[in-house]
Image (cartoon, rainbow, N blue to C red):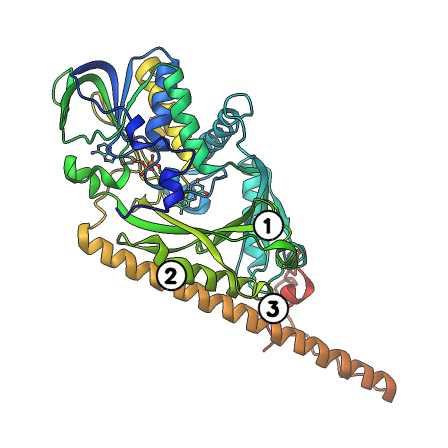
Amino acid sequence: MTETSASATNGPDVPAARERARLSFDLDVDIAIVGAGLAGLTVALEAARLGASVAVLEGRHVGWNASGHQLGTVMPGYGLPIGDLIARIGFEDARELWALSKQGAEYVRATASEQSMPGMALSEGALEVSNVDAGDQLISRLQMLGEDFETEVEGWQVDRVRAELKTDRYFHGVYYPKAFQVDGRKYVHGLAALARRAGARIFEDTPVVSVDSSGIRKRIVTPSARLRASHIVLAGNIHLGATLPRLSETLLPVWRYGAVTAPLGGRLAEAMTFQGSVADSDGIDHFRIVDGDRLMWASPETTWAARPERFAPAIARRIRTIFPKLGRVEIAETWGGAIGQTVHGMPQIGQLRRGLWVASGFGRQGLNTSAMAGQLIARSILWGDERWRLFSPFELVWAGGPTGRVAGHLIGMWGRGSSAAAGALARYRERMRTKERIHEARLAEANRQAGTRPPRPSRPRPPPGRPHAQRPAAPPTNTADAEGPPP
Ligand SMILES: Cc1cc2nc3c(=O)[nH]c(=O)nc-3n(C[C@H](O)[C@H](O)[C@H](O)COP(=O)(O)OP(=O)(O)OC[C@H]3O[C@@H](n4cnc5c(N)ncnc54)[C@H](O)[C@@H]3O)c2cc1C
């Protein structure tokens, strides 16, 4: 993978290369973990806290990939929409999985507390905005989340969304008051520090070359040492590659790029006052204010590794498209990371064979889900907690190898294109509705002055023998939306 931004790799949070410990001697442990991202480090921390001897083997350095380059938004849920989750596994299991995802978010909050990770700059609230005017869908989603899945949510009308985000790109919103933001880079290094303190050993610059999981004691080979363990946890995301090619091929790698602007001063308030994170419901843009007057923004994606700097102009254009009032913005820093997408949209959590575990495929929502995975796996190994089996319906499905990447890219482009088209259509309809309202108001005024009234539209009669159909309750959207588009 291409290295990410200079400050991300050499900044104050990241230990310099000379300080990194490489595994150079043979070692025997209870649990060996491949990968020092969010997933591997959470398993390490939890297993060490429960008294196991733990070694983490990381090919580069802590947080090298996505885990060190995320936006820090912590929300309940998964990449798979809640309706699809219910359709796939039924209501009761979906509720349990949702509850686990909430516990994952709570775990991050507790772990990132001021006592254990000082200076995490925690901020509250996340807003999911729709770029089409689908108020009725929003209502049913709110009901399901609030009543059936016991998640605190608020429905925001278009006016409320646009009071905080001054753009006509977004319509309704779902506000999660219990969601929050952490400093993503600090969090992953904080996890490593806590895991070390709990007794886990973390070896960087130590790529795992091969894994033999056949015996009771499993074996791992690295370039300069061997390791034996009763349990191996594969938390290498898409970079496991040749070590376990069949497992790697169940993930579609997607590189996502992020940036932070130069300070925007007072003009930022003319575009946005909302202090939590914002994500659109199509998963295209994800942003928030950092350092008081900068925007942190993630948007473009590719299915191949590219230099993040290349995307600075694209991100600047994207910011301007959403917030034209901001005018030109200067990008101060860019970065990127690869996420692993599964075919079904749910993470891979569980035991592949006796003593061989996987914690991967967290997609764009990795903070709460990897926290949950870390707890589930550590507790299963050490306490016999079997709740990871709730993920069994989501098997390892081949993601298509190189052909899958091309298909994934085309599907991604199509998805973005069609959602941009849907957004344009929604804005067009809104303009037309405004024109229509002005037209109707003028007509009413003209009729009033002339003392005439427009003819009443005739109501269709119900067919004989059928009761009058109940008019469905209008969704509590603004009147324009409830009326629907003009003919
Ligand atoms: C731009 C961007 C923004 C994001 N924003 C958010 C957000 O706001 N909220 C959220 O919840 N999620 C977000 N995500 C998603 C989140 O970052 C990921 O889901 C999560 O970091 C995945 O963690 P991981 O531990 O599975 O993988 P990784 O971070 O990829 O860690 C895996 C590690 O394993 C190592 N490894 C692999 N193979 C080997 C081997 N053979 N030997 C040794 N080591 C190996 C790799 O070097 C790597 O360090 C974002 C992602 C990106 C890219």
Earlier in the chain: of badge 3 and badge 2, it is 2
Asked whether, in this view, residue 450 is left or right of residue 481, the answer is right
Asked whether, in this view, residue 214 is left or right of residue 102, the answer is left
Report which residue position mark 1 lands on. Answer: 293
Disc 3/disc 2 C-alpha distance (Å) = 24 Å
Disc 2/disc 1 C-alpha distance (Å) = 31 Å
Report which residue position mark 3 lands on. Answer: 484
Question: Percent from the top left, x then y, of residue 170?
Answer: 57, 60
On the image, which quarter does residue 380 sit in?
A: top left
On the image, which quarter does residue 143 sit in?
A: top right
Q: Could you tell me if residue 97 is visible in this image?
A: no
Report the front residue among 184 and 372. 184
Asked whether, in this view, residue 449 is left or right of residue 41, the answer is right
Q: Quadrant of the C terminus?
A: bottom right
Report the front residue among 411 and 29. 29
Q: Please, what secondary structure does the residue beneath circle 1 have?
A: loop
Q: Residues within 10 Å of mark 3 (few under 14, many from 20)?
A: few
Report which residue position mark 2 lands on. Answer: 415
